[in-house]
Image (cartoon, helix red, strand yellow):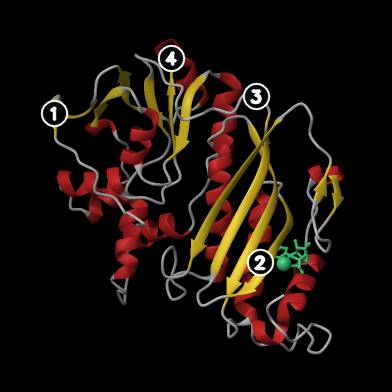
Amino acid sequence: MFFKLKYSIISSMKAKTIKELGEFGLIDFIKKHNTKPKSYHNVYLDIGDDCFSFNPHTKSKYIVTTDILIENVHFKRQWATAKQIGQKAIEVNVSDIASMGNTKPLYAFISLGMPKNTPTKFIKELFNSIKSTCNKYGVHLSGGDTVGAKDITISVTLMGICYDKPISRTGAKNGDLIFVTGTFGDSCAGLEILSKDKKSLKNYEKELIKKHLVPQARLKEANLISQNIKITSMTDSSDGLFKSIELLTENKGAVINMENIPLSKNLIKYTNNNFDKIYSYALFGGEEFELVFTINKKDENKLKKFLPGATCIGTINNGKVTYLQNGKTKNVKYNGYKHF
Ligand code: ADP
Ligand code: MG
């Protein structure tokens, strides 16, 4: 317990800040507005007790992931609405679950740190958005913790099940093809545009920003491909495409054809079609939640049938990772965001 005033003293309707609403007022708000997805019949104890309790899904493997969003590191309140922050907090975790293959996310735990003067309106909007994004994926909001903090901190733990063997980052074999979903570089360009605090925005700039603020997890796509094709390794590109390639090629190599990396028209416009600029966004820009995965070459046509939007960007080998620009080797060195 951190906030001293209790819900019984000031009703949640009147409270203007979290200090007035209090920890219990907030928990009451969460409890009252919580929804119960289809998988809810497995729940034994819900929000309001010391622990959440559920009956095991015995035939499946449990998968658990956690991601933290911190104000002024991952988002700024003047750039993103509470709704967008809530959506992103859930989407980025669903993206981790998706990268395990044939999965279903089930239970979300939200630990929240915030300053005393945080407006109640902001918190309610944040939770409504967290809940509606959970609903989109059939996830049940199952618990969390609420504390006072200097900056808003949202830590989400998402638990799910994987119906088959979870797909790790390290299963790729020599000769496997590397595929990706979506396009790369938009989120990073969107963040750059936001940081310029421009007064008016062109349409393509608005779209790049949207990619940064409200990413969409590729859960449907991950389920579809892993149910139908043997995916030999997979990850999501949360730290950028270059990093994802590094993860999938640990102790291996690859040839990456840079001209095959999918790009949006918006990014090409934003960079005036400058090759080096485009690839600094597309390779090193983080907070992009696409799937990066490998398959055996014999499954290429099958993959194209199930996921026609996926793009082959290269091939795994036993050498080093080499980047080619129209057949010529390009010297590419890591240039992405470092937290420490
Ligand atoms: P404890 O003191 O035992 O940690 P709390 O008073 O913090 O319990 O929490 C009471 C109940 O409210 C628990 O079921 C907890 O999971 C839930 N809860 C607290 N904060 C949140 C939150 N931010 N989101 C979802 N559930 C929460
Ligand atoms: Mg607690």
Q: Residue at x 44, y 26 (%)?
A: 170
Q: Position of residue 289 (x, y in %)?
A: 45, 45
Upstream in sequence: badge 4 or badge 3 = 3
Look at 28% across and 71% down and name the residue there.
196
CB at mark 4 closer than 8 A to ligand 1? no
Mark 1 and mark 2: Cα distance apart in space: 49 Å
State the mark number for residue 164. Answer: 3
Q: Amino acid at mark 4?
A: Asn
Mark 2 and ligand 1: say if the CB distance to the nearest ligand atom is below 8 Å: yes
Q: In the visual, does 216 lie left or right of 164?
A: left
Q: Position of residue 89 (x, y in %)?
A: 55, 57
Q: Which residue is mark 2?
A: 127
Is the CB of mark 3 within 8 Å of ligand 1?
Answer: no
- Above-or-below relation of 324 to 19: above
Three-letter amino acid code at disc 2? Phe
Q: CA distance from mark 4 to mark 1?
A: 25 Å
**Which of the numbered marks, if any, corresponds to residue 296?**
4
Question: From mark 3 to mark 2, how far is it between C-alphas?
Answer: 32 Å
Q: Residue furthest top?
A: 298
Residue at left 72%, top 29%?
A: 60
Quarter-wise, where is residue 115 in the image? bottom right
Secondary-structure class at tag 3: loop
Q: Quadrant of ligand 2?
A: bottom right
